[in-house]
Image (spheres, helix red, strand yellow):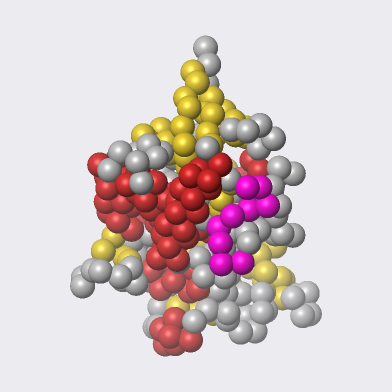
Amino acid sequence: MKKEIETDILIIGSGPAGYTAAIYAARANLKPHLVSGLEPGGQLTITTDVENYPGFGDVIQGPWLMEQMKEQAVKVGTEFHHDIVNNVDFNKNPFHAETDSGIEFISKSIIIATGAQARWLNLESENKFKGFGISACATCDGFFFKDQNIIVVGGGNSAVEEALYLTNFASKVTLVHRRNKLRAEKILQQRLLNHPKINVIWDHVVEEFIGSDKPLSLKQIKLRNVNNKNEKIINATGAFIAIGHDPATSLFSKKIKMDNENYIITKPDSTETNIKGVYAAGDVKDKVFRQAVTAAGMGCMAALEAEKYIAENY
């Protein structure tokens, strides 16, 4: 049976953007409801050391920071739902949103903070060994690859960070990149290229993951040179895919204005979307900075803009 909940603000998503929006909305006495989605805490829950979030002299842990944000949001009055929103209707006013467990939210405003998800290579052999040697999260799974040969695929910040992190466990880490130079920050590049455990294979892409069926386990990786098309096989029992992220916006497809990469478009210096009363904050709309602190800032903006919208329209 459907349960209806009326609210001033519904927040969809629970990373730094969602939690910060909840804190500000609750403190404005708007009694927000937050639906956490599949990964409460977002990408920071799969990040270990965080040393660039202001206010902490010592290195902190991503999951701990998210727990603190959640606790703060709940303490100031956020209603928290461990659930998934599977349908939204922006044509109705107030807006409607339905969840997996059968709740129908009727909300004066909605803040979208669904974040982004890891991108995969989409190879058949990748799907076969996912969870059996192939991962997109070094901090979640690096521990299982102690003293093993592993590869990291990618050339941006996340790929370099994952490769460096994995040297804590693996005996050897090979970074495979399809270009002849990295996109990562210079300081990270220096650390990577100077690391005795890390080797880089330039101008190559993964063609196939090879392993055994009983038990299911990864053994080798077939690489192809992008210039001369030559193939080679390297031995590796683990592979970490770090080729970027896709915004989690499929729920809002054709319902809200997005760019060609499916990031939600907002007005300049604002989190307001093309629909008045609907706001987007964090990695769901930001493909440039993608930082916890900028996501939190956008969550604050969204809550303040929603508060103003409600005051003027209800």
Q: Nearer the viewer, residue 154 or 112?
A: 112
Q: How far across and how far down the image is residue 169, in percent?
A: 34, 65
Predominant SS along the magenta part? loop
Instruction: Name the image quarter holding residue 284.
Output: bottom right
Tell me if residue 275 is in the magenta stretch. yes
Q: From the viewer's perspective, is residue 188 above or below residue 53?
A: below
Q: Residue at x 56, y 62 (%)?
A: 270
Who is closer to the viewer here, 312 or 298?
312
Give the extent of the magenta segment: 268-276
The extreme left residue here reads 57
Residue 255 in view of the camera: yes
Answer whether residue 37 is visible to the viewer in this image.
no
Based on the displayed image, in which of its 4 quarters is residue 259 positioned? bottom right
The residue drawn where x is 49% and y is 50% is 308
In percent of width and height, residue 241 lies at: 55, 61
Residue 33 position in % (x across, y down)? 42, 36
39 over 179 or under it: above or below: above
In the image, 42 versus 163, the foreground residue is 42
Q: Residue at x 46, y 32 (%)?
A: 7
Q: Is residue 20 above or below residue 60?
A: above
78 or 174: nearer the eye? 78
Q: Residue at x 29, y 60 (%)?
A: 61
Decide whether residue 264 is among the magenta residues: no
